[in-house]
Image (tube, rainbow, N blue to C red):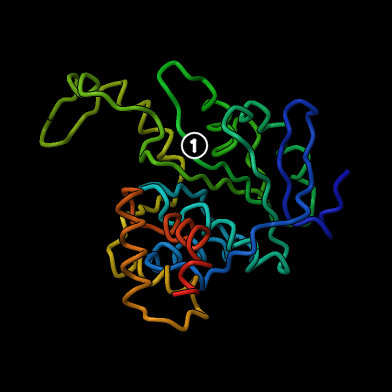
C-alpha cells in the first residue's frame, strides 16, 4: 500500500498489477519552459481549480513533438505536490486497468492526475473504451479527486482518413459528420481542455538553449551557431533538441 503523504508519483506496472512508487521525479520547473506561456497558463489555472475542489477539466495536450507537452505535466507536480497533487502514470496498453487504478485512489485525500504520455489509437483499437468511462463515468460518476491528462501528437487521438469524410453532409448550413468521424471526435471531446502545441520558432529554440547554458562564459554567437547546426542535423528546433544539444556539447562548448 502506497503512503501518498510521502509518495508524490507512481507508475502502473501491468505484470505485477500494482502501482510502483516513483522515488526520483523529473525536477523540471514551470519557469524553465519557454514558448508555451498560453498553454502553461491555461493548464495551471485548470490544475489550481482542481486542487481547490472546484470543477476542472480533463486535459489533452496535443501537437508537435518535443514542444514541452510532457514536461509541462511533470512541472505541475513539482509546483503543486505540497498542495496535495499526485500523479499516476499509465501506459496506453494499460488503460484496460484504469477502473481498478481509479478505485485504488478515489478514497484518498490527495488530488490525482492520471497521466498518459504519447496517447493515440489505431483503427480497431478498443483500449480507448475504458478511457471514455473514466473521463465521463458510466453508472458511477468519476471521482472528484481524479483528473486525466494526456499528451498526443494527434488532435483526435484516432487516425483520420480522407474516406472517413465522404459521408459528411452539409444540412441547413450545418456540418453533419459521418458516423466514423463522430466516433473519432467523440473521444477528444471528452477532454474539456484541449491545448495545441506548435513547432517553436528559432528565437524560442535559442532561448531554451541559453537556459541550459546559464554559466556559459564564451561567445553566445558561437554557441547559437553550434545549437542551430545540431538542430538542422536532427531536423527539429524544440526543447527536446535543446536538451540533447546540451547533453552532447556542454563540455565542448565550455572549452571554446
Residue 71, placed above or below residue 89? below
Percent across and percent down for residue 177 are 24, 28
Q: Look at the image and tell me in which quarter the C terminus lies.
A: bottom left
The x, y position of residue 188, in whole percent, is 41, 38
Q: Position of residue 251 (x, y in %)?
A: 53, 67
- How many numbered discs sit on the rendered protein? 1
Query: Which quadrant of the view contains residue 47?
Result: bottom right
> From this viewpoint, which residue is outermost toward the top?
124
Seen at 31% across and 68% down, the residue is 225
- Identity of the residue drawn at 44% across and 42% down: 152
Q: Give the labeled residue for mark 1.
A: 119
Q: Residue furthest front?
A: 255
Give whichever of 14, 111 is nearer the camera.
Answer: 14
- Residue 253 on image: x %, y %: 46, 70
Q: Quadrant of the N terminus?
A: top right
Seen in the image, is 54 located left or right of residue 193?
right
Frontmost residue, 153 versus 80: 153
Q: Could you say which quadrant of the image residue 223 lies in? A: bottom left
Depicted 166 relative to depicted 247: above or below: above
The one nearer the camera, 101 or 196, is 196
Residue at screen point 45% across, 55% down: 240
The answer to which image quadrant residue 93 occupies is top right
Residue 15 lies, with reference to residue 174, above or below; the image says: above
Kindly identify the residue that appears in the image at 71 percent across and 42 percent down: 11
Instruction: Look at the numbered disc 1 and give the secondary structure of its residue.
Output: loop
Query: Is residue 232 rendered to the left or right of residue 86?
Result: left
Q: Is residue 227 above or below residue 153?
A: below
Check disc 1: other Cα within 10 Å, few if <14, some if 14-19, many if 20+. Answer: many
Amino acid at each position: 500500500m502506497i503512503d501518498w503523504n510521502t509518495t508524490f508519483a507512481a507508475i502502473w506496472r501491468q505484470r505485477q498489477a500494482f502501482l510502483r512508487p516513483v522515488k526520483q521525479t523529473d525536477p523540471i520547473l514551470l519557469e524553465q519552459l519557454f514558448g508555451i506561456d498560453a498553454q502553461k497558463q491555461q493548464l495551471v489555472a485548470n490544475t489550481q481549480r482542481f486542487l481547490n475542489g472546484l470543477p476542472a477539466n480533463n486535459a489533452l495536450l496535443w501537437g508537435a513533438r518535443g514542444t514541452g507537452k510532457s514536461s509541462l505535466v511533470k512541472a505541475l507536480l513539482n509546483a503543486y505536490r505540497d498542495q496535495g497533487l499526485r500523479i499516476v502514470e499509465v501506459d496506453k496498453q494499460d488503460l484496460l486497468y484504469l477502473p481498478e487504478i481509479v478505485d485504488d485512489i478515489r478514497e484518498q485525500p490527495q488530488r490525482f492526475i492520471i497521466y498518459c504520455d504519447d496517447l493515440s489509437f489505431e483503427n480497431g483499437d478498443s483500449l480507448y473504451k475504458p478511457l471514455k468511462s473514466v473521463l465521463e463515468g458510466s453508472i458511477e460518476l468519476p471521482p472528484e479527486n481524479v483528473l486525466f491528462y494526456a499528451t498526443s501528437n494527434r488532435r483526435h487521438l484516432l487516425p483520420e482518413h480522407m474516406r472517413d469524410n465522404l459521408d459528411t453532409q452539409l444540412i441547413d448550413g450545418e456540418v453533419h459528420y459521418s458516423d466514423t468521424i463522430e466516433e473519432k471526435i467523440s473521444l477528444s471531446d471528452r477532454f474539456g481542455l484541449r491545448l495545441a502545441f506548435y513547432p517553436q520558432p528559432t528565437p524560442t529554440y535559442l532561448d531554451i538553449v541559453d537556459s541550459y547554458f546559464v554559466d556559459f562564459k564564451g561567445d553566445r554567437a558561437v554557441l547559437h551557431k553550434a545549437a542551430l547546426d545540431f538542430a538542422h542535423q536532427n531536423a527539429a528546433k524544440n526543447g527536446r533538441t535543446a536538451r540533447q544539444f546540451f547533453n552532447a556539447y556542454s563540455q565542448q562548448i565550455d572549452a571554446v
